[in-house]
Amino acid sequence: MPAVSGRCTIADAALTVTTEQAANAATIAAVARSRGLPERATVIALATAQQESRIRNLAYGDRDSLGLFQQRPSQGWGTEEQVQDPVYSAGKFLDGLVEVPGWETGRLTEVAQAVQRSGFPEAYQQHEGMAQTLASALLADSPARLSCTFSPADASGPLDQRAAAVADVVRAEAGPPTVLEGGVVSVAGTGWPEATWAVAHAERLQLTQVRFADWTWTPGDGWAQTGEDAGALLLQLAV
């Protein structure tokens, strides 16, 4: 997947993140949602990732800490490859989170610290507001809550191979995909959280358009209402 360099904004909120941060945050939210966890789980996970890595999938850290949550292979979190896989690392954090007594109502930094065992146990609290804003946008069942802008890179590689690679990512995080002609990946049975996920991942996946309901997103213009229902979540790859 290509490097990312764009920016994402949230409607009615003074928060801007990079497309790298947005994609990773969307993955965290998708993993939590796939487990049926309440929004609070995503908030705690995002605040933790913001403190540990600024929601970046780091290939370095203190001692052998790696990834979004700076998890240490030597401490049983998984292999180096696993803890640098955002889906895996988010899942491992959530595994620990739900084992914390009272995690749904406890003070965020105390709950996060119970999972992470950091040398800075109060550091997570400062990110709660940002994490709440981001989680609410990613999980909202309402249109156009998050929009990303970037300069699309030139398409690289055979279109069918790129579409298959995008379908693999979609299958792991958003829902069952169908690869259509012309570099379109369709995702049925989805809602606005999945459409928002797609926009958050658009630069990384080399998408030039996302359509859902009667809305269309492009990297230059953001979201616009078209009046024509797409019938499914449709992801258009660069051709």
Image (cartoon, helix red, strand yellow):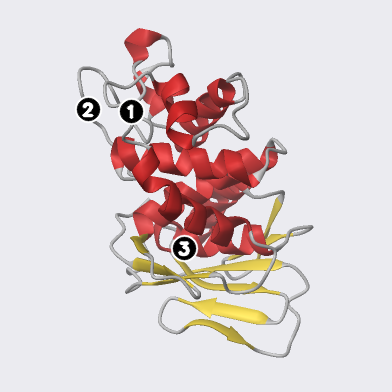
Say which amino acid is labelled 1.
Gln
Tell me: 150 left or right of 32.
left
Q: Along the line of sight, which residue is nearer the eye, 235 or 25?
A: 25
User: Local crowd at mark 3 within 10 Å, few (<14), some, or many (≥20)?
Assistant: many
**At numbered mark 2, what does the secondary structure look like: helix, strand or loop?**
loop
Q: Position of residue 127 (x, y in %)?
A: 38, 47
**At numbered mark 1, what does the secondary structure look like: helix, strand or loop?**
loop
C-alpha gap between disc 1 and disc 3? 25 Å
User: Local crowd at mark 2 within 10 Å, few (<14), some, or many (≥20)?
Assistant: some
Residue at point 20%, 17% (across, down): 63
Q: Position of residue 13 (x, y in %)?
A: 45, 70
C-alpha gap between disc 2 and disc 1? 7 Å
Note whether 83 is above or below 136 in the view shown.
Answer: above
What's the mark number on residue 202? 3
Quadrant housing residue 139 = bottom right
Badges 2 and 1: C-beta atoms under 8 Å apart? yes
Q: Which residue is mark 1?
A: 70
Residue at point 40%, 82% (across, down): 220
Q: Along the line of sight, which residue is nearer the eye, 97 or 2?
A: 97
Q: Which residue is mark 2?
A: 61
C-alpha gap between disc 2 and disc 3? 27 Å
Is residue 239 at least partly visible in the picture?
no
